[in-house]
Amino acid sequence: MKIKFLGACGTVTGSSYVLTSGSGQAILVDLGMFQGPPAIDKLNYAPYDFDCTKLSDVVLTHAHLDHCGRLPILLPKGFTGTIWMTSPTRDLTELSLLDSARVARNDGNPILFDKKLAEQTFTHFQTIAYRQPKQIGDFTLTMRDAGHILGSATLEIIDNKASSELRTIVMSGDLGNTPEDLLQETELIDEADAVVMESTYGDRIHPHAIAPDVLKSEIDTVESNGGTLLIPAFALDRTQEVLHILMHLRKSGTIDATTPVYLDSPMAIQATSIYNSYPQVFNAHIQSDLSAGDPFSFPGFITVAKGEDSRALHTKQGPKIIIAGSGMLTGGRILSHAIHYLPIPTTRLFIVGYQAAETLGRALLAGDKEVIIDKQKVAVRAAVNDIQSMSAHADQQKLINWLRHIKQVKKIFLTHGDDGPRAALAKKITAELGHREVTLPIMYQEVSLS
């Protein structure tokens, strides 16, 4: 078996790997979008370094764009096979790709695919349940719950045509920050010959801040000064996590019942509906909440679908909470709110997710007092705060604990992380677990597992 690394090598985006069996049959795992500064973003438009007509199948780990965002380019390149994923991932991926096609019409960059091509791609989607082995050509695939977002999967793949003793490879996908507020715990793997593992937070431990307490403090401040709390949030998982915390704060009477909470993101509204369609994937805590109603809704919660209603929020007086995308302030409705509210001293910006280098979110966290948004200079007089304990990614120790459980590992490949974090994780793996075959692959590198 061979593996070719076609993304997420020295960066946290663009995940894509080709596995070739001992008989020469190839499958693709993920085809994600590169996201970040221009040097990274331009990789989306580079020629894809594999003949897609030779792919029998594709396997998708989950619905974040950095894992699924380029899937439609397969069809013009000659791919005719099946794209496998869990049922929740199918629904969320369709939502993500349609939204990406819509955004691409207006962002001024070259268009990777349009709505029509995205919809043609959906006809290739087929679903697999967790823990149900599936024969895919020369490979046997089993999906395990990664605990990252709804439907996310870790892959166990056996090459039935391998000519060497290295036959089983585990591909982590993105591992969740387990135990997570909404989802079941990340499933552990017992045994593998090789592991391809994410390393997003390979150099740090998440702080142990208690998210409801921190969020309550932010809300208390705007309720006392009549200001606005802006929460830029990713539409998948982070928005639902924030809503669930707000639900408990509101129903327990911990925060004022009269302060409106606006979800100003059509995609997040649809994603929340999809989350509600899969109650069986939630953890026991959410299961118990379901008996009392929608775990993401509460008195004073208002969804904002239309653009004119979003702009009208700027005229509403008194304290309020606005949740909007994008999570890194790289686009979406949060930008118009940032232009309007950042110059106002009573505003609080509460960042609840990862902020990539050279994004507006990263600049605001760094303390910039003036930023450029949509070619406008915007003074920053708002207070900016963040919380890292809400990350959907495992930190260094949780990555180590996940890997520790897997026996008989002979080779480890660290991807989906900047070079600093994955180098730190490699050092930790060697020191704490004794593994010495730890590779930091580079783009386009192909490795034999013999």
Image: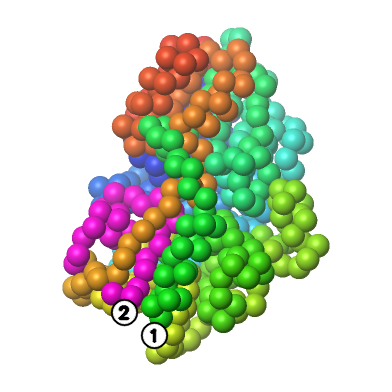
What residue did someone put label 1 on? 314
Residue 235 seen from this side: no
Q: Quadrant of residue 29?
A: top right
**Apparent side of residue 362 relative to residue 206 in the rendered image (left or right):** left
Q: Is residue 351 magenta?
A: yes
Residue 156: image location, x then y, percent: 64, 29
Contact flag, marks 2 and 1 (Cβ < 8 Å): yes
Q: What residue range appears in magenta?
A: 345-370
Q: Residue at x 43, y 15 (%)?
A: 430
Q: Amino acid at mark 1?
A: His
Q: Check disc 1 and report its element: helix, strand or loop.
A: helix
Dot 2: within a 10 Å radius of its alpha carbon, few (fewer than 14), some, or many (20 or more) residues?
some
Residue 283: image location, x then y, percent: 71, 48
Dot 1: within a 10 Å radius of its alpha carbon, few (fewer than 14), some, or many (20 or more) residues?
few
> Measured along the vertical axis of the image, is residue 295 above or below residue 407?
below
Q: Amino acid at mark 2?
A: His
The foreground one among 156 and 225 is 225
What residue did someone put label 2 on? 340
**Apparent side of residue 14 relative to residue 296 in the rendered image (left or right):** left
